[in-house]
Image: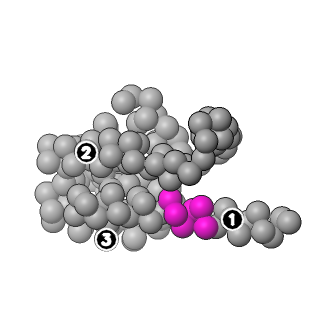
């Protein structure tokens, strides 16, 4: 039974990722770009901390930022005395896009539970909330604090 349960979680994860990718594509963003924009939409983040919170290497983050910066959605800032420390902030266009994606994700992602009755949807929300709150992921902290601000 445990393997079957794990299999169902894999497919649920896939379903969520596909829906997220569809929403991002509707805004001409990759899921990674959308996640990056949402991570910096409310306040600048240091690149080192951002890589850790997103669970990617600094090199991968640099490449992602390069692509997103070329689109005019984010900018690097070196305000620290140590010029090697760079913060990433969102541009006005990036903030507008991040807020649009975030609003659509929070509206449309729960639609995957439409196959459940109202009681099961409430149980799923309660369980998902408990799992997220129990997570020690820095990325989860970023997304949760953004959700609390909205």
Label 3 Cα crowd, 10 Å radius (few <14 / some 14-19 / many 20+): few
> Which mark is in front, 3 or 1?
1
Query: Mark 2 near mark 1, Cβ–Cβ under 8 Å?
Result: no
Rendering quarter of residue 58? bottom left
Q: Which residue is mark 3?
A: 63
Q: Nearer the viewer, residue 95 or 51?
A: 95
Question: Which residue lies at the image location 31% right of the left edge and 71% below the top edge?
Answer: 63
Q: Residue 138 placed where, x, y %?
A: 54, 46
* Residue 49 relative to residue 71: left or right: right
> Which mark is in front, 2 or 1?
1
Residue 133 visible to the viewer: no
For marks 3 and 1 on the same chain, the one whose residue lies earlier in the sequence: 1
Label 1 Cα crowd, 10 Å radius (few <14 / some 14-19 / many 20+): few
Question: Which residue lies at the image location 13% right of the left edge and 57% below the top edge?
Answer: 72
Q: Is residue 12 positioned above or below 133 on the image?
A: below
Q: For marks 2 and 1, give the CA distance.
A: 30 Å
Q: Residue 95 placed where, x, y %?
A: 22, 43
Q: Which residues are magenta?
A: 11-16
Question: Which residue lies at the image location 15% right of the left edge and 65% below the top edge?
Answer: 70
Query: Mark 3 near mark 1, Cβ–Cβ under 8 Å?
Result: no
Q: Residue 91 placed where, x, y %?
A: 17, 47
Colour pattern? one colour
Q: Is residue 72 magenta?
A: no
Q: Residue 140 placed where, x, y %?
A: 53, 45
Query: Mark 3 near mark 2, Cβ–Cβ under 8 Å?
Result: no
For marks 3 and 2 on the same chain, the one whose residue lies earlier in the sequence: 3
Q: Is residue 125 positioned above or below 58 on the image?
A: above
The numbered disc on residue 8 is 1
Q: Which residue is mark 2?
A: 100
């Amino acid at each position: 039974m445990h393997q079957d349960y794990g299999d169902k979680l894999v497919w649920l994860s896939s379903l969520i990722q596909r829906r997220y990718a569809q929403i991002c594509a509707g805004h001409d963003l990759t899921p990674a770009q959308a996640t990056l924009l949402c991570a910096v939409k409310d306040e600048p983040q240091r690149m080192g901390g951002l890589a850790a919170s997103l669970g990617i290497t600094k090199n991968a983050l640099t490449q992602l930022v390069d692509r997103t910066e070329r689109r005019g959605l984010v900018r690097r800032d070196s305000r620290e005395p140590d010029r090697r420390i760079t913060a990433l902030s969102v541009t006005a266009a990036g903030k507008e896009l991040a807020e649009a994606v975030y609003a659509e994700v929070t509206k449309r992602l729960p639609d995957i539970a439409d196959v459940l009755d109202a009681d099961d949807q409430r149980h799923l929300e309660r369980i998902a909330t408990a799992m997220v709150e129990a997570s020690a992921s820095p990325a989860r902290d970023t997304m949760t604090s953004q959700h609390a601000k909205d």
